[in-house]
Image (cartoon, helix red, strand yellow):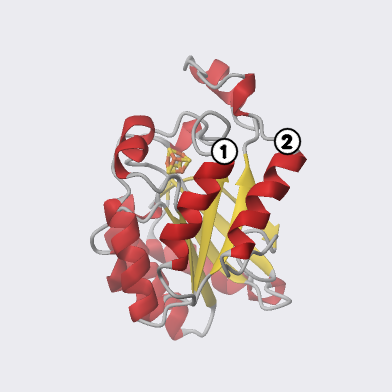
Amino acid sequence: MRIFQKGFNFSQDGPGNRLVYHLQGCDLRCPWCSNPEGLTVNGGTEYTVDQIEEEVLRSQMMFFDGGGVTLTGGEVTMQFAQVKELLTRLHSRKIHTCIETNGLCTRLPELFPVLDLLIMDIKHYDPEKHKAVTGASNEMTVRNIRHALDAGQELALRIPVIGGFNAEEEDARQFAALLSGFGGGFTLELLAYHEYGKDKYKSLGMAYTMGPEAKVSRQRLQAYSDILKASGLSLIKT
Ligand code: SF4
């Protein structure tokens, strides 16, 4: 498995104290991505599934408050076979498993039986706008939300709220219409745009194309959140 970052994180990538692995490679190109070093499939450090499993088992004492292991990226499903094998082994050892994904992978439902929590981003409600900015339509992500709910998979959805892309009140109403149509069974979290990855772009010789209009004020985020809550969605903040 190619991994570009790993370490403990408390509560933001699943419950409790978690060992979080960032896997190399992504099939989208969101211009606000905070991990540009993880976009290509090459790079990072190569580990075997055995090595990661051993590291996790050695770390079990640290999984307090319901913690466990989270695989994120990049996009975890780019290394599908190894991810499935690792999750299967960890699940069989009763370690809490979580992945964070963009939801594009057609084989995603194969992971549900070995996954305690699925965190999925939905970046835009409109398939064309999603494609124009990230490089792919949201159709597969929407389909995978349905599959996850039908399978009884614990599901946490997240919307990155980005000025100039999806941050207007009308966008919140459109998201509310799409997501309330699923009939519940998931949590929803808003992630306001941030510039954490900006400096990495320079050092990688990549252009950072996001401007100041991408920032979202606290008031705007509150109004956005209120619209989603009013449609009955279960908003959380981690
Ligand atoms: S899906 Fe995530 S990792 Fe991939 S480009 Fe978008 S923000 Fe970055």
Q: As drawn, is 62 to the left or to the right of 69? A: right
Mark 2 surroundings within 10 Å by alpha-carbon count, few (fewer than 14), some (14 through 19), many (20 or more): few
Outermost right residue = 218
Q: Which mark is residue 168?
A: 1
Of 231 and 38, which appears nearest the observer?
231
Of 210 and 56, which appears nearest the observer?
210
In the rendered image, residue 220, in percent from the top left (x then y), is placed at: 70, 40
Dot 2 falls on a residue whose secondary structure is loop
Q: Are marks 1 and 2 in contact (CB under 8 Å)?
A: no
| Residue 54 showing in the rendered view | yes
Q: Quadrant of residue 59?
A: bottom right
In the rendered image, residue 89, in percent from the top left (x then y), is placed at: 40, 77
Q: Which mark is residue 217?
A: 2
- Image point 46% across, 28% down: which residue? 31
Outermost left residue = 106
Q: Amino acid at mark 2?
A: Ser
Of 208 and 188, which appears nearest the observer?
188
In the rendered image, residue 38, in percent from the top left (x then y), is placed at: 45, 37
Work out which quarter of the rendered image holds the C terminus and state it.
bottom right
Q: Quadrant of residue 65?
A: bottom right
**Mark count:** 2
Label 1, label 2: how far apart the Cα atoms are: 11 Å
Of 186 and 28, which appears nearest the observer?
186
- Image point 36% across, 44% down: which residue? 126
- Image point 66% across, 30% down: which residue? 215
Mark 1 surroundings within 10 Å by alpha-carbon count, few (fewer than 14), some (14 through 19), many (20 or more): some
The mark that comes first in sequence, 1 or 2, is 1
Q: Amino acid at mark 1?
A: Glu
Q: Which mark is residue 193?
A: none
